[in-house]
Image: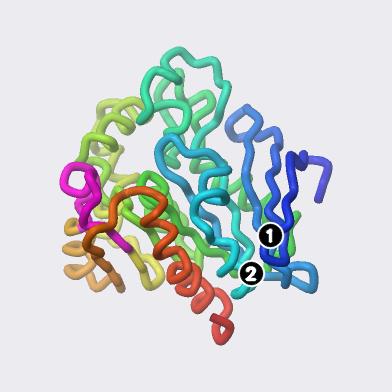
Amino acid sequence: MTSELRLLSEHACFGGLQCFFEHDAESTGTPMRFGVYLPPQAAKGPCPVVFYLAGLTCTEETFAIKAGAQREAARLGLILVSPDTSPRGTGLEGADAAWDFGHGAGFYLDATVAPWASHFRMERYITQELHALVTTCLPVLPGAVGLMGHSMGGHGALTLALRHPGQYRSVSALAPIVAPSQVPWGRKAFAGYLGPDEAAWAAHDACALIAAGGRLPPLLVDQGLADKFLAEQLQPERLETVCREVGQDLTLRRHSAYDHGYYFVASFIAEHLQHHARLLAPGKA
């Protein structure tokens, strides 16, 4: 590791290491934290890496603690990176006023409206600064980078991969917000971070980006049918429709009885990691 990274903790896990780091991020102007799982194979040579973007209210620890992903990552030889969901401690008025906007709710975009534009630059952080840091400081197999996420993080995985074609060779999502410009969570966030011009919102809406010609690697999406946010906030049928219309490769799996939380994520995380391994390291999944 370089002096840019401060190791906060390190834990032996399935023959590898679960670590947590902090660094001073230029993009957000704040300290940022992220988790890293290094599988045992990383001690011998470069491995593919999968970035996981978490949902509203989550931190860099949520995925590492709740998803149970390390066992399968160790088997497959995948590095896992889990960044925080927003800058913290910004001092901005209103940043802690709501659970679905501000701290813990960065929506993986670069805000353009004051005061949020001064710190809430999560797209730049994930796709440029953290990407460069991880691929430089960790034993990452060149070009073997995947992106996945849950809920708000599923929105982030889809839109960042669409907005940065070629950067991610594999993409998947669990209960993603697929059309944020059309649902309450996204409309609130976009109005706050991007302003009232809805034309600007389409550039951060996965369904709008796909309709406009954006394409992804073969996409895997899982959705629980007992998810209380399904009808109002998630609406996966919008993604299904636009992908079918334009020929985007999509596997959308619906699961009865599963809700929105990490019991759902933990139930299907192994299959998502296998999906990434097949695309990032063919023959090893």
Tell me where residue 44 sits by quadrant. bottom right
Q: Horizontal and vertical percent for residue 220?
A: 36, 68
Q: Is residue 225 magenta?
A: yes
The kind of residue on which mark 1 rests is Cys
> Within 10 angstroms of label 1, few (less than 14), some, or many (20 or more) residues?
some
Q: Which residue is pictured at 20% across the width and 51% down the height?
A: 235
Tell me the crowding category of disc 2: few under 14, some 14 to 19, or many 20 or more residues within 10 angstroms, Cα based. many
- Picture quarter containing residue 224? bottom left
Residue in the image at 46% along x and 32% along y: 104
Task: Tell me if residue 163 can be seen.
Answer: no
Q: Position of residue 64 (x, y in %)?
A: 57, 51
Give the residue at x 25% y 54%: 207
**Residue 116 seen in the figure:** yes
Residue 69 magenta-drawn? no
Residue bounds of the magenta highlight: 222-236
Q: Residue furthest bottom?
A: 283
The label number, if any, that marks residue 13 in the structure image:
1
Which comes before the other along the chain, label 2 or label 1? 1
Q: Which numbered mark, 2 or 1, is in the foreground of this view?
A: 1
Q: Secondary structure at mark 2?
A: helix
**Residue that carries the numbered disc 2 in the rendered image:** 74
Residue under the image location 25 percent in, 30 percent down: 197
Q: Position of residue 262 (x, y in %)?
A: 41, 51
| Quarter of image, res 94 | top left
Q: Are marks 2 and 1 in contact (CB under 8 Å)?
A: yes
27 relative position to 228: left or right: right
Residue 110 to residue 92: above or below: below
Quarter the C terminus occupies: bottom right
What is the spatial separation of the Cα atoms under label 2 and label 1, in whole angstroms? 9 Å
Q: Secondary structure at mark 1?
A: strand
